């Protein structure tokens, strides 16, 4: 796939305010407009909370796959319900806990562990992923997503090991390597993906490695989604 053959439009930056709820409301409207035009929204952050605004605009029956070093499943963080540490918890309240799969997670608080076990949220640590191997994990992701009409993908850049992507807000040791992540996001992108985001890039924290990794991941996901769309159209 030649990425230049994929039709892309840069809609510019969302006009944000200090009120998180208002920012999410605006993002929901913009994302909804993109979806209603038959396009696929691709959101870039910045703070992981933006995923919630996009998911609020999605149709029902959507499976959410999150590649993240953290669970983001706390009920509150810093006295608030809306933040990067609670975003997947809020999303689970929209799509259901059975519609979430967390991949690459390796930093959880006790509250999140209890919630994951109680709700039986599907998750894979990097070491479990390596034990199973890419092919088996890919099969697991396909089986999970086959239950839903649509797929939403969210990539927190700290899912990568800091050796490959140091410029992130909350780096965690022993993450995925680029090959593992690229292989798996390509699988997800081909399962009826309706939109995706890539978040938590902090360019000033390194010499450009994180931004390079992010741009390559975005290109990979868009190309895979386009290949899947063309394959579906021709079948």
Image: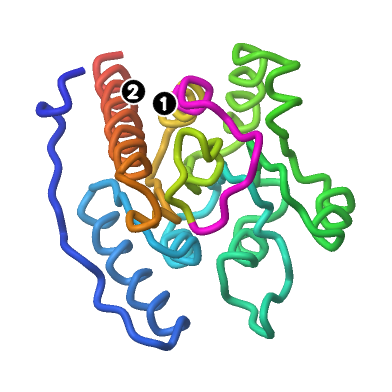
Q: Which mark is residue 190?
A: 1
Q: Which residue is mark 2?
A: 228
The answer to whether the residues at label 2 and label 1 have Cβ atoms under 8 Å apart is yes
Residue 103 percent location from the top left of the image? 63, 37
Q: Is residue 54 visible?
A: yes
Q: Position of residue 165 (x, y in %)?
A: 45, 40
Instruction: Report the predominant secondary structure element of the magenta stretch.
Output: loop
Dot 1 crowding, Cα within 10 Å, few <14, some 14–19, many 20+: many
Q: Which residues lie in the magenta part?
A: 169-182
Q: Determine whether 27 is above or below 175 in the image.
A: below
Quarter of the rendering containing residue 203: bottom left
Q: Residue at x 57, y 39 (%)?
A: 148
**Residue at 61% across / 35% down in the picture?**
175
Residue 135, picture quadrant: top right
Query: Which image quarter holds the N terminus?
Result: top left
Q: Where 233 falls versus 82 (above or below)?
A: above
């Amino acid at each position: 796939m030649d990425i230049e053959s994929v039709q892309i439009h840069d809609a510019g930056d969302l006009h944000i305010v200090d009120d998180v709820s208002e920012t999410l409301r605006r993002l929901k409207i913009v994302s909804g407009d993109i979806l209603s035009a038959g396009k696929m929204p691709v959101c870039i952050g910045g703070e992981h909370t933006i995923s919630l605004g996009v998911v609020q605009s999605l149709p029902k029956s959507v499976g959410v796959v999150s590649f993240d070093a953290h669970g983001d499943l706390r009920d509150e963080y810093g006295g608030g319900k809306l933040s990067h540490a609670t975003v997947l918890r809020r999303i689970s309240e929209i799509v259901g806990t059975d519609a979430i799969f967390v991949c690459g997670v390796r930093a959880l608080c006790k509250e999140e562990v209890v919630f994951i076990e109680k709700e039986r949220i599907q998750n894979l640590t990097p070491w479990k992923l390596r034990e199973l191997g890419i092919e088996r994990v890919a099969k697991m992701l396909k089986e999970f997503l086959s239950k839903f009409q649509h797929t939403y993908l969210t990539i927190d850049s700290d899912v990568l090991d800091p050796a490959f992507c140091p410029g992130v807000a909350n780096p965690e040791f022993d993450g995925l390597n680029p090959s593992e992540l690229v292989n798996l996001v390509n699988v997800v992108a081909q399962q009826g993906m309706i939109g995706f985001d890539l978040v938590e890039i902090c360019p000033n924290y390194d010499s450009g490695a994180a931004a390079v990794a992010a741009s390559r991941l975005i290109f990979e996901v868009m190309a895979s989604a386009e290949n899947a769309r063309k394959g579906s159209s021709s079948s």
